[in-house]
Image: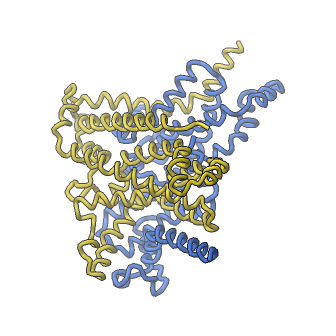
Amino acid sequence: MRKKKDMLWYLLFVLPLTLVFISVVIVPFFMGIGYSFFSWDGMPLNPKIFVGLDNYLKLFSDQRFLTSAGHTLYYTVLAVVIINILGFSFALIVTSKLKLRNLGRTMLFMPYLIGGLILGYIWKFIFSDMLRSVGEMTGLTHIFFNWLTDPDLALVAIVIVSTWQMAGYVMIIYITGIQSIPEDVIEAGKVDGAGFWHLLLHIKLPMIMQSITICLFLTLSMSFKIFDVNFSLTGGGPNNATEMFAMNIYNEIFSLNNYGYGQAKAMIFFLSVAVITLVQVAITKKREVSM
Amino acid sequence: MKKIMRIVAEIGFILLCMVYLSPVYIVVTNAFKNRAELYENMLALPHSLDFVYFVEAMEKMHIVQAFKNSFIVTSTSLFVIVILASMAAWMIVRVDNIVSKVLFMVFVATMLIPFQTLMMPLMQVMSSLSQKTGLPFINSLFGLVYMNLGFGASMAVFLYHGFIKAIPRSLEEAAVIDGCNKFRVFWKIVFPLLKPVTVTVMILDMIWIWNDFLLPSLVLSDKQLRTIPLSTASFFGQFTIQWNMAMAGLLLAILPIIVFYIAAQKYIIKGVASGAVK
């Protein structure tokens, strides 16, 4: 009797969320696996034709897809490195003895709240109009021109915008790490004659390995999944030169109406994100020191 | 000498922060300029505080309606996520059986699935759910809140789970002896204790839901239902860009979040920090 009552309580607490979760995440996930084996244009009345692994095999000869994957890798490597170095430097500065450090922290974090889509539009103006007018004013038109029209620089422009967005965010996480280093460890290092770089490389960095793991994981997965900034800043252009993985999937499904084929890409996307982030966490976790 | 170095460092630092935030300055100042004035010098302060472009942008972006929609979606989503996820997480921690273990594992594992993997089948599931139940899952704020709840569930359960595990059981047991049922135990005793993690969940989800673009763009097709990111995107998609008016529009779009940030910065930064480190 008591057991049955406990069971009812359990269901009452757990079931509402679980049912919503199943219908929004679990069922679509498994249906997604199914769709990826079909050829279908998304029209409910049109036939879904089973094509087995054809969608997946087609990926290897899809030039636009491979290029977008290449862009994603290039962008991700650049973005992860730059965001983390900048964010960590910010964290070092605002944990120093500066009086204005709290104000600085507030200011540097602000871009993260604005959201990728709107950030992209703001920077679109900076790249397309401001940079050009700076070029005209200074005469340095080979440096200051609309980067978004240049296939190589447009991707760098996206890196700059995401760095602006994310550096303050990883800064917050690095601050937590730096503040958890015991004061006496730093003091002991200083007494032993360690300089700035020695303290940084041999004491601080190893001791904040946990923050590094988190920041790498977050920036890696966010960079890999980038869509909003890509959409609003360049729209994938010029000439698909900045189309990245997530955007390629979106276009394949909703612009070209290749629902089955696009879904196969989406499954590969999931596997890539999962493998890359899990490998990264496994590697950096090993280097964490416990205190 | 040392004092001068110090002052130089302080000034240098605040200059760095100002340069970093200069894109915001550019949006604010250029929102007041007309076309000619804007192209004359984009970094200068405006000659006069002319609000005419704001009025125009407000009309073209339907900003009042968009703000209302964003507000409704964000606040209702936060409300249901906090209520249902804290309840579920509490039971999952306290009833230590195989079901709980599997549930928790599934919630955590699915955090790795990117939205793009789910978006197409999700729309299929939701439109067939709409047909079967008669409820408007597609093209309604209700549907968007429902999906936000589903996507927000994993992280919220994960954060609550970690927090609840550290709370001793004894208080709850005492309440049970006093004759409280589980419902009362949870709402009277446990939920108030969860306040710090509730703040964290709310802040992380608020940033995500307020700025979310892709999911709402798939769910909401009705013009009347557009949230702020959606109305911004359609504004930029529609017109050849008149940057002075666009700046006014962008400023209106980011204003609510900046005002909110300035008011609650302490909690926001703390919430983001504790959410990420978990």
Q: Report the residue at 27% width, 42% height from top.
A: A253
Among the chains pictured, the one given blue colouring is B
Q: Where, by quadrant of the figure, is residue B61 drawn?
A: bottom left
Colouring scheme applied when the structure was drawn: by chain
In this rendered view, identify the residue nearer to me: A255 or A285.
A285
Above or below: residue A138 compared with residue B219? below
Among the chains pictured, the one given yellow colouring is A
Q: Which quadrant holds the N terminus of chain B?
A: bottom right
User: Is residue A69 toward the left or the right of residue B233 in the image?
Assistant: left
Q: Report the residue at 51% width, 41% height from top.
A: B152
In this rendered view, identify the residue nearer to me: A141 or A262.
A141
* Residue B227 seen in render: no
Which residue is the extreme one toward the top? A1
Q: Where, by quadrant of the figure, is residue A260 drawn?
A: top left
* Residue A200 seen in render: yes
Image label count? 0
